Amino acid sequence: MARSVADPLRALWRLRARSTTLAEAVYQTLRAAIRQGHLSEAEPLRESRLAARLAVSRTPVREALQRLTREGLIGHAHGKGVAVPALDARDLDEIYEIRLALESAAARLAASRVSAGELHAMRAVLERAEAARDSDPRRLADLSARFADLIGEAARNRRLAALIRQHRDSIIRAEGTTLGHPGRAEKALAEQRALLAALAAGDAEAAGRAAHEHLDEARRLRLQLHFERA
C-alpha cells in the first residue's frame, strides 16, 4: 500500500485509469511519466515491471511502449530493451529546426482559420500564464504547451498538431523547462502575446514570424543551458 502512495507512476495512473480505454490510459500514463521526468534515462522500461506498478497485464504496456517508440519518446537501448534516450546538443538543435518549421507553419495556417472561441481560449491561457509567471515554472510550461496546442488545433491539421506535440515533448522530457531561467518567462509571454495579436489580426506572415522568433529564442537559451550543464 505504501508503494502505491509513493510511486509517481501510480499517482499518474489514478488520474487516467477511469477516463478512457485501458490501452489508452496506460499509454497516456507512461507518456506523462516520461514528459514529467518520472521515467529517467537511467531506467530500462521493462514490460513486467511497469505492468506490476500499474497493476495491469503486460499487453497494454507492450502496446504503449511500441507506440511511444514510434513517436520517438523512447528508443532501443543496447541490452536494455527500450529506455528514454539521452539528448545531446545536436539532437536538441535538430529537434528545434523541426519545431521551427512546424510551429511557424501552424501559426500561418491558424491565422486564416482560427475562430473567435479559440482566440478567447488563447487569451485565457495567457492570462493564467501571467499569474504563474513569477512563481511556478512548471505550471507556466504546461500553460505554454496548452497555448501551442490551441494554435495547432486552430490550424485544422491533426497530423501537424500531433507532430508538434511529439517534438515538443521530446525536449521537455529530457531537459525540463527553460521558463525558470531569469527573465525568460516575461520575454516568452511577450512573444506569445505578439503571436496572439497576429492571429487575431489574421496576419499569416506576422504569425509565422512571431512563432519563429519565440522558438528561436527558446532554442538559443536551451542550448546555452545544455552546454552549461555539460
Image (cartoon, grey):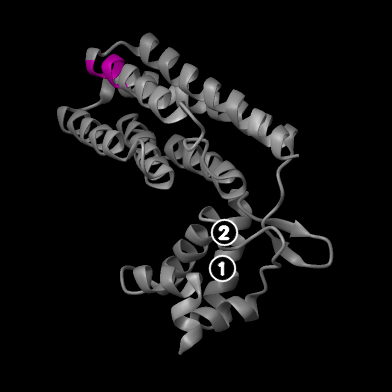
Residue depicted at x 49% and y 30%: 182
Whether residue 135 sits left or right of residue 36 in the image: it is left
- Give whichever of 69, 147 is nearer the camera: 147
Residue 13's x, y, as percent? 42, 72
Q: The disc labelled 1 sits on which kind of residue?
A: Glu
**In the drawing, what numbered circle is on residue 214?**
none
Please state if 141 lies on the left or on the right of 173 as rendered: left
Residue at the spot 66% in from the left edge and 30% down from the top edge: 223
Cβ atoms at labels 2 and 1 below 8 Å apart:
yes
Residue hosting label 2: 67
Placement of the N terminus among the 4 image quadrants: bottom left
Q: Amino acid at mark 2?
A: Arg
Tell me what residue is drawn at x 30 percent, y 10 percent.
203
**Residue 55 in view:** no
In the image, 224: left or right of 135? Answer: right
* Picture layout, residue 225 above or below residue 220: below
Q: Residues within 10 Å of mark 2 (few under 14, many from 20)?
A: some
Dominant secondary structure (helix, strand or loop) of the stretch shown in magenta? helix
Residue position marked by numbered label 1 in the rendering: 63
Q: Looking at this rendering, what residue extends furthest in the bottom direction?
A: 1
Residue at image coords 27%, 32%:
126
Provide residue 228's location: percent of width, then percent of height.
Answer: 70, 34
Which type of secondary structure does the marked residue at label 2 adopt? helix
Quarter of the figure with the C terminus: top right
Give percent across and percent down for residue 147. Answer: 34, 35
Any magenta on residue 197? Answer: yes
The x and y percentages for residue 205 are 39, 9
Closer to us: 177 or 120: 177
Please tell me whether residue 183 is drawn above or below residue 4 in the rendered image.
above
Residues in magenta, as a range: 196-200
- Distance Cα–Cα, label 2 vs label 1: 6 Å
Quadrant in the picture for residue 79: bottom right
